[in-house]
Amino acid sequence: MAGALSALAFPAPSLWWFAYVSLVPWMLLIRSAPTARRAALDGWLGGLGFMVAVHHWLMPSLHVFLVVLAALLGLLWAPWGWLVRSMLGGAPAAGRAAAALAVVPSGWLMIELIRSWQGLGGPWGLIGASQWDVSPALRLASVGGVWLLSLLVVAVNTALTLLVAATGARTTAAIGIVVCAVTVGSVWAWVPRAEQSGQARIAVVQPGVVAGADAVERRFSRGEALTRGLAGQDVDLVVWGESSVSSDLSARPDLAARLAALSRAVGAEILVNVDARSTDASGRVGIFKRAVLVGPNGPTGDTYDKMRLVPFGEYIPARAALGWATSVGKAAGEDRVSGTRQEIMTLPGGERDGAGPGGGGLRFGPLVCFETAFPDMSRHLVADGAQVLVAQSSTSSFQHSWAPEQHASLAALRAAETGRPMVHATLTGVSAVFGPNGERVGGAIGTDRGTAAVYDIPLARGTTPYVRFGDWAVHGALAVLVTLCAVRGVRSLRRPGPTPPVPRARTTRESAAHPAR
């Protein structure tokens, strides 16, 4: 299907440039549809193909249910298909072509916004995210987030569609491409980079694939051994991956003591992730995905419970109706319990090269796995004072797929959007660290390795436009669509209605009884 082509722009293929042309075949098909209904159908089928291609690595877990979910979410592209035909169909004049360059990308962005709701799967595979490794695009992300990148990518595809198929609008399309290029160039030249304000030394522990009946215990021991090897390296923080501890530390004082001993040996706090049944501060009991900071005397009390859970992977929406999904895939047998608020954790002790404001310790914002896909979560952490974003993840179920690379790439976007470095630590890879401009820091730890690595991470001060102004690109796209609806509504009111039929005049020789022949 034409909609599936865009998946090649994401990691692992990472053909970022292909994103700017990948939608053109789909748009050409839609604009040539003989009816609006057929255009909507082409939009739906293309959306289905896009969703399956971007999430194909879920097939071993969800099986045929992935196609069902993709078909349902693909319906979001049906109105977009109608919109593309309306704006690009036939022989658009310059005015309609210019409007299409704003309307078509805005319609696409509304789809991304709707499907970014956690219950619909979250913002995985936003087309703007394909630009995670392109420096000018990352600078644009600091202004308007990944949403602005999506608008740019779809606008270029729209312009290229006009160049190919609408001879009367080629000048307008060319001007549109030039405007996009000038916008990116201007942002690259004039938007300031994050200003460095010191550095933090953070270690990532990735135990690698550990299988077998006693995998949980052996993985903990493997992480323990790798962490012990960090002694003497003067690190500020050691980060373990998601689900690195499988028991509530309050119920397993032996594990808590082992972690405290590690903290003393290394001379730094350790951020672990507990995937176990426990109780939160409000008295709720259940299985939490909990980031826990452990110091030389044991857990420090700083914890964060994962708020946005993975549909089907960590809970089943409407379990009473959809619980059968557990019989056809690896869906959650029991729903995890979500946290209620984001947290900022602070390391004790003095600052390193200006790391902590007012002489305090380093402040970092924890995220767990799936949450790195949500731009608003990292933005809120930075607005609340986080100097570093730290994500704990586990993609061990998808080792030989594109998922680990795709997941790690999201950290570059979150770093660029917020102007703060981000650490992405996993159990089995890919672990990676990105600086405050989205640039890679050090080397990534691939899925074929189990190791501990230390990163000297540049810190930054200041506030990016995206953190300051938020999702203004989304609001702008919504305003474009509202304006379109208003203009078309006014035109429909001004358009004269159909003239009532006038009875045919009779001649003097005809009558009702003897009509003319």
Image: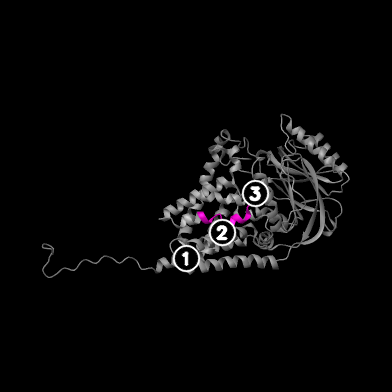
Marker count (numbered): 3
Which residue is at the front of the view, 344 or 12? 12
- Image coordinates of residue 204 in percent, x first then y, are 78, 45
Q: Which mark is residue 11?
A: 3
Residue 24 sits inside the magenta stretch: yes
Going from the N terminus, do you reach mark 2 or mark 1 first?
2
> Around disc 2, counting alpha carbons within 10 Å, would you say few (fewer than 14), some (14 to 19), or many (20 or more)?
many
Q: Which mark is residue 167?
A: 1
In the current view of this chain or complex, which residue is farthest to the bottom?
508
Going from the N terminus, do you reach mark 1 or mark 3 first?
3
Residue at image point 79% right, 56% down: 458
Left or right: where does residue 77 sit relative to residue 209? left
**Contact, CB < 8 Å: mark 1 with mark 3?**
no
- Image coordinates of residue 237 in percent, x first then y, are 81, 48
Q: Which mark is residue 129?
A: none
Location of residue 316 by image quarter:
top right
Q: Which mark is residue 154?
A: 2
- Give the quarter of the figure containing the C terminus: bottom left
Left or right: where does residue 129 sit relative to residue 458? left
The amino acid marked with disc number 1 is: Thr
The amino acid marked with disc number 2 is: Val
Can residue 349 be seen? yes
- Image coordinates of residue 323 in percent, x first then y, are 56, 36
Location of residue 279 by image quarter:
top right
Residue at image point 66% right, 40% down: 400
**Contact, CB < 8 Å: mark 2 with mark 1?**
no
Depicted 155 relative to depicted 455: above or below: below
Residue at image point 51% right, 45% down: 71
| Local SS, label 2 | helix
Q: For the magenta stretch, what is the residue range? A: 14-25
| Local SS, label 1 | helix
